[in-house]
Image (cartoon, helix red, strand yellow):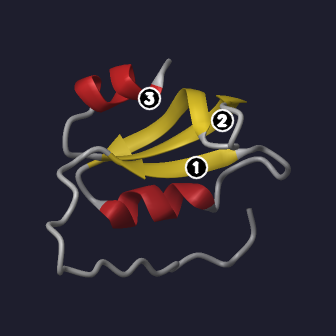
Amino acid sequence: MGIEELSQIYQSEWVLAEVLETDEEGAPKRVKVIRHSKSRDEIYKGLGKIEQGKHVCTLYTGEIPKEGYAVAFTSHGSGKV
């Protein structure tokens, strides 16, 4: 599935996906959805269940914060992927 299609299907959700193909800059181009949720914590819980060596990414398909706002991300997992 392409990133644009993913964004349309899972609107304003967090998505954990396996990266199947990247563009020339290394950004995900085609992915397979592993888990999706309105809750970021649910996605982070799924990270601990990923098979070692799998290339995965987390995406948020909602609105990007306006200029002047900052967003911080933290990891609550074991650090093992």
Residue 21 falls in which quadrant of the image? top right
Q: Nearer the viewer, mark 3 or mark 1?
A: 3
Residue 41 falls in which quadrant of the image? bottom left
Residue 72 - label: none
Residue at which label 3 appears = 3
Residue at x-position 63% and y-position 62% = 48
Residue at which label 2 appears = 19
Structural distance between the alpha carbons of marks 2 and 1: 7 Å
Task: Name the residue nearer the viewer: 39 or 55.
Answer: 55
Residue at x-position 83% and y-position 52% = 52
Q: Position of residue 7 (x, y in %)?
A: 30, 31
Question: Which mark sits nearer the N-terminus, 2 or 1?
Answer: 2
Residue at which label 1 appears = 57
> Above or below — where is 50 with respect to 76?
above
Q: In the displayed structure, does residue 15 sit left or right of residue 67?
A: right
The residue type indicated by label 3 comes to Ile
> Above or below — where is 25 with respect to 48?
above
